[in-house]
Amino acid sequence: AQEANLDLVEVAPMAEPPVCKIIDHGKVLFDQRQKMRAQRKKQHHVEVKEVKLKLKIDKHDYETKLRLAAKFLEHGDKVKFTIQFRGREITHQELGRELSERTLKDIAWIGELEGTVSRTGRLHTFLVTRRRDYKPKPKPKASSQGPAATPGPENDPPATPADEAAKDSPKPPKQVDALHGGEETAILPE
């Protein structure tokens, strides 16, 4: 081992006779560290993300919060929903229960309730995890087709009769609006 500038390492000390190998011990340690680092990269640390809702939430805001929660669940994180009561809203506990049930129903395609809905003071909280039977969509890979994949006249789909008619139809006349800095506006037929 000394002649080859390597180390003599005992692999199986309990065997009869003990098994030894002539290897570069530094290289073995380096390879072990690299494998551990690669394993840590592959691991996903599950985080708990919080989405806060109010009783008087607008439809669009509610849908935005649900999309955000679905994105978190798809990534593999857990989502903690918190419904906050403000002022006299605390007297209407049934509205909070209805909102939590509606939220669970709307997110059921990707997530499921973990535990129960807890009601403490002015907050209703519940934890949602990704469904076991949900399979995330595979990420689209960048196409390696090169310039053929870029949009252009040669890659456009064939024109339909409706497209041809739209090309032949007359354009509405333009009118210059002096009040708005000379912007051109189209005069639409009534």
Image (cartoon, helix red, strand yellow):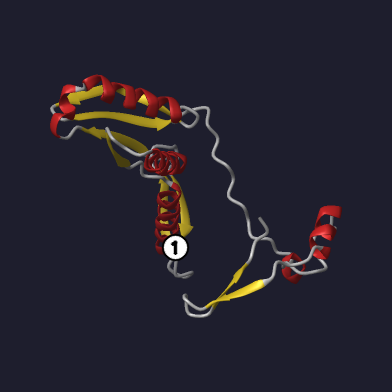
At x 57%, y 42%, the residue is: 137
Determine whether the residue tagged by mark 1 lies in a helix, strand or loop. helix
**Which residue corresponds to mark 1?**
27
- Image position of 13 with respect to 20: above or below: above
Classify the position of the C terminus by image quarter: bottom right
| Horizontal and vertical percent position of residue 22 | 47, 58
**Depth check, front residue: 177 or 22:** 177
- Whether residue 86 is visible: yes
| Horizontal and vertical percent position of residue 151 | 73, 67
At x 36%, y 36%, the residue is: 78
Res 81 → quadrant: top left
Mark count:
1
Q: Residue furthest front?
A: 190
Res 123 → quadrant: top left
Residue type at numbered disc 1: Lys
| Horizontal and vertical percent position of residue 55 | 27, 32
